[in-house]
Image (spheres, coloured by chain):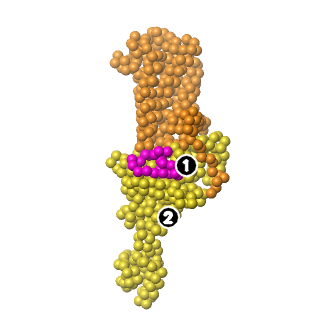
């Protein structure tokens, strides 16, 4: 027996506090793992950050010349829209990370280890939110360069940031659930195709009031629109007064921007947990 | 008396997926410190068996204890004593070999410093120290498997489960993995490995359970399983097709059984109860009859033949990596 090489067998904590500490440590370890991925693949991180910037520049400078935003400027108008789009696109990275682990057997290895079951999503979620914060920072800098400004002070601006991260938080559960039910990471193609209509059929890049009535109504009720419109309000975008359609949804965007992510979480969180448990069946 | 203690003790395990019974009353007892092979065709239930024992799947019925802990009632305790190496090298392909092992060490609650030290030890032991700082995705198949094994060894587990550890590996990598498994067993770890490769079971396992349709249909050491097929086999190759008849008559006499004659291969074969008596008797009789012999020998049946005999179907071919599909998707 090579007893000298054998590390101690960890004692599973019995108290709730001890368990919480274990869970926090495991969640942190997996957050570090995700961050190490970024460090090992800087080119992919750069791509992820530059893509939304590219879309802003494309939209702003290619389409922008023909776009009239009453009382405002189109380039400033789409910046909050792209903030929310970036949150939406984030569902792809959550999905891919979860699906790759499942396909490679890494999830099974985790589940056969004495670690907290919550750690996988906690680590994933923390890393995804940090990613989003970084992406929003880069986008905001780019926005400032092309004429976007915060008009109503730092407090409401931070509230807007909070709403964006809340949307991203809700989409983590959708990404985890979809990643667990998917056949493999290749299915990300489907998500990539789906996020475009969801993103575009919203107030992100054009005002729903310019769409055909029925389509505009759909766009206004899109959870994306709630966050985008609420952010424009909180950032004090000058176009908002002129563009208000007078509908209930556009009048209560902040309320909806809180309610929608909570609703998404209420649906996908239990689904993700159930799916995760079902892995053991 | 630790050698007599069971590292795995399972009885009546049942597990159904839809209408398929992946496990249908499987019993398994593995003494501590031994290497045990689970041998069976695709979909026989080997992978499901490992998943139940490694706490990844709950059995519908039956009980199982691993390293003294019940897999259903105390899965957390089981997890502190086992290592699992699945069908795919389950490592993070973006991280380096070292980063992988440090991460798994921390998830085993070794603490940051001890996890780093353990990672260094394991990299050394599995001859990965030179590649430690390269991404695991850039490793060869054999290296990735060794990293996978190292990750399963973080806590020097009492029981290590290996699910088809060499499927899809080239022969050289396969031998590397075999060496690693032998070294682990030599260190006192109980190893339970599933395989479709009879050669693998023959080389590594102290005992083998042959599994078919979710239950154990034969069990014992590879030698004992082979002797179940009627023991040794006499084989005579003649030079001249005309001598086949005479050779067959002699084979029948020394074996007391009906010989098989393969006219194309100029071969006569028969099972024999006593290898030495049969061989000397046959050589003498052939000499006296003036039969010219190209080759003569007595050999034990291969595990392939045992397998064929027990399951009524051929074993999987070595060159087609296949998985227990219905079980993986579950």
Q: Residue B287 bears which disc, if any?
A: none
- Residue at mark 1: chain: B
- Along the line of sight, which residue is nearer the eye, A241 or B81? B81
Q: Quadrant of the N terminus of chain B?
A: bottom right
From the image, state the color of chain B: yellow
Q: Is residue A251 visible?
A: yes
Quarter of image, res B10? bottom left
Q: Is residue B118 magenta?
A: no
Find disc 2 in the rendering and name its residue.
B202
Q: Is residue B54 magenta?
A: yes
Q: Tell me the residue at 51%/62% (across/down).
A: B205
Q: In the current view of this chain or complex, which residue is farthest to the left?
A: B19
Residue A153 in percent (x, y) is at: 57, 12
Mark 1, secondary structure of its residue: helix
Q: Quadrant of the C terminus of chain B?
A: top left
Chain in orange on the image: A
Residue A156 in percent (x, y) is at: 54, 14
């Amino acid at each position: 027996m090579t007893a000298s090489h054998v590390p101690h067998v960890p004692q599973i904590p019995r108290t709730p506090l001890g368990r919480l500490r274990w869970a926090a440590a495991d969640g942190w370890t997996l957050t570090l793992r995700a961050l190490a991925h970024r460090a090992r693949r800087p080119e992919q991180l750069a791509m992820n950050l530059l893509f939304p910037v590219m879309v802003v520049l494309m939209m702003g400078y290619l389409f922008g010349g023909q776009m009239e935003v009453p009382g405002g400027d189109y380039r400033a108008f789409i910046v909050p829209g792209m903030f929310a789009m970036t949150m939406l696109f984030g569902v792809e990275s959550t999905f891919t990370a979860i699906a790759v682990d499942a396909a490679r057997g890494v999830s099974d290895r985790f589940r056969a280890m004495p670690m907290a079951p919550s750690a996988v999503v906690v680590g994933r979620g923390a890393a995804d939110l940090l990613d989003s914060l970084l992406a929003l920072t880069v986008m905001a800098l780019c926005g400032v360069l092309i004429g976007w400004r915060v008009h109503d002070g730092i407090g409401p601006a931070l509230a807007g940031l909070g709403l964006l991260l809340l949307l991203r938080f809700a989409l983590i559960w959708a990404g985890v659930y979809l990643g667990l039910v998917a056949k493999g990471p290749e299915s990300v193609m489907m998500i990539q195709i789906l996020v475009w209509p969801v993103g575009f059929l919203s107030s992100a890049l054009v005002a729903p009031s310019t769409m055909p009535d029925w389509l505009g109504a759909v766009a206004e009720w899109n959870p994306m629109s709630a966050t985008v419109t609420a952010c424009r309000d909180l950032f004090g975008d000058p176009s908002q007064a002129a563009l208000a359609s007078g509908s209930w949804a556009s009048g209560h965007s902040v309320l909806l921007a809180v309610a929608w992510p909570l609703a998404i979480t209420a649906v996908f969180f239990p689904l993700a947990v159930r799916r995760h448990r079902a892995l053991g069946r | 008396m630790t050698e007599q203690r069971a590292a795995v003790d399972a009885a009546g395990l049942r597990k159904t997926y839809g209408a398929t019974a992946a496990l249908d009353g499987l019993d398994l007892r593995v003494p501590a410190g031994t290497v045990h092979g689970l041998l069976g065709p695709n979909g026989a239930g080997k992978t499901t068996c490992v998943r139940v024992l490694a706490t990844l799947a709950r059995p519908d019925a039956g009980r199982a204890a691993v390293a003294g802990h019940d897999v259903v009632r105390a899965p957390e305790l089981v997890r502190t004593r086992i290592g699992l190496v699945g069908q795919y090298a389950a490592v993070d392909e973006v991280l380096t070999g070292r980063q992988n092992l440090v991460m798994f060490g921390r998830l085993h609650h070794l603490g940051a410093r001890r996890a780093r030290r353990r990672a260094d030890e394991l990299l050394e032991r599995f001859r990965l120290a030179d590649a430690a700082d390269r991404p695991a995705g850039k490793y060869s198949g054999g290296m990735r498997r060794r990293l996978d094994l190292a990750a399963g060894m973080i806590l020097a587990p009492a029981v290590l489960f290996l699910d088809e550890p060499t499927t899809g590996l080239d022969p050289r990598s396969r031998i590397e993995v075999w060496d690693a498994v032998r070294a682990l067993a030599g260190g006192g770890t109980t190893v339970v490995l599933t395989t479709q490769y009879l050669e693998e079971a023959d080389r590594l396992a102290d005992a083998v359970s042959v599994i078919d349709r979710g239950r154990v249909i034969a069990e014992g050491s590879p030698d004992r399983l082979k002797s179940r097929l009627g023991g040794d086999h006499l084989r005579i190759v003649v030079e001249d097709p005309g001598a086949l008849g005479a050779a067959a008559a002699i084979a029948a006499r020394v074996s007391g059984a009906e010989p098989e004659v393969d006219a194309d291969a100029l071969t006569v074969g028969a099972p024999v109860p006593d290898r030495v008596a049969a061989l000397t008797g046959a050589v003498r009789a052939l000499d006296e009859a003036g039969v010219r012999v190209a080759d003569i020998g007595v050999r034990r049946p291969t595990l392939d033949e045992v397998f064929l005999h027990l399951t009524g179907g051929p074993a999987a071919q070595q060159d087609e990596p296949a998985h227990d599909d219905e079980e993986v998707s579950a």
